[in-house]
Amino acid sequence: MIGRMSERILTALPVFNEESHVGEVLTEVLQHVDDVLVVDDGSSDRTSEILTRDFPGVNVEHHGQNRGYGAALKTAFEFALKYGYDILVTMDCDGQHQPRFLKEIAAQVNRPDQPVEMVSGSRYLQQFGNNSLPPEERRAINARITRCLNEQLGLNITDAFCGFKAYRVSALADLDITDKGYAMPLQLWVQAVDLGWRISEFAVPLVYLDEARSFGGSLDDATIRLNHYRNVLNSELQRRGMSQFLTLDCGSQR
């Protein structure tokens, strides 16, 4: 049996201008889980219309304007805490994450042999037959940051940036997420280590449907994005009093 019958599990999807994916993704999600939250992060396309018209039973939290990926996830954390869920699963709405894994990744949180606070999806832990070939610069940045986190924080992960995750909701109350953008996972990893979270990885397929997806503004430049990630990581280490781990050369070529 997957999980305990008494567990309340919430699946949350941050969305921003996802009119081309949101209907199909949510239809499949609802085949696997019941409690779903969509955080509409200030969409200006037809995303909100589709949610209202086609998915009246789905919880929706609206941001009046686009705040960023990290801010949308923070809203999901707060919702899960407010309404007393036991496990929160987060997944993207761009077709990269497959809903058929939702129950399985949620079940990893309370495994009898290895309960954890966070289960992090990994696109590089296992080869799947339908894996995509990732854009080279994205794969390279992920690999550098992942290596940096492992070396500096004593982690043993293979994918620093996968958005498919499961959390023990009670642990989320201890987080202090301030980064509103795509660098938010770096704050998450630092705080998870600082808080002594138990962490495991869960293999998921590597799927890229939109290789041209924008990070926004100057962050589309790989060098600028890598430097931004490094700066956010160092700032968070300093903020948490972990300056002994400052990674001034994080992401450098070796």
Image: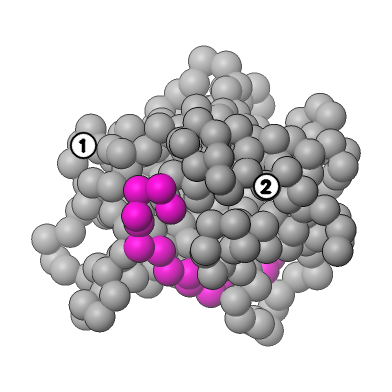
Quarter that holds the N terminus: bottom left
The picture places residue 239, in percent across and down from the top left corner, at: 50, 31
- Would residue 39 be visible to someone looking at this image? no
Is 125 inside the magenta-drawn segment?
no
Mark 2: give few (<14), some (14-19) or many (20+) Cα within 10 Å.
some
Q: CA distance from mark 2 to mark 1?
A: 38 Å
Left or right? Give the position of 181 relative to 48: right
Label placed on residue 247 = 2
SS for callout 2 = loop
Comes first in the chain, label 2 or label 1: 1
Left or right? Give the position of 5 relative to 156: left
Kind of residue at badge 1 = Tyr
Kind of residue at badge 2 = Thr
SS for callout 1 = loop
Q: Residue at x 57, y 16 (%)?
A: 65
Q: For the view shown, which residue lies furthest in the front direction?
A: 244
Q: Residue at x 70, y 41 (%)?
A: 229
- Which residue lies under the disc numbered 1? 83
The picture places residue 24, in percent across and down from the top left corner, at: 56, 52
Assign the magenta stretch its main secondary structure. loop
- Would residue 45 be visible to someone looking at this image? yes
Quadrant in which residue 180 is drawn = top right
Quarter that holds the C terminus: bottom right
Left or right? Give the position of 97 relative to 148: left
Q: Residue at x 48, y 71 (%)?
A: 202
Is 166 located above or below residue 242 in the figure?
below
Q: What residue range appears in magenta? A: 193-210
Q: Residue at x 43, y 69 (%)?
A: 200
Quadrant in which residue 119 is drawn = bottom left
Number of numbered tags placed on the structure image? 2
Quadrant in which residue 198 is drawn = bottom left
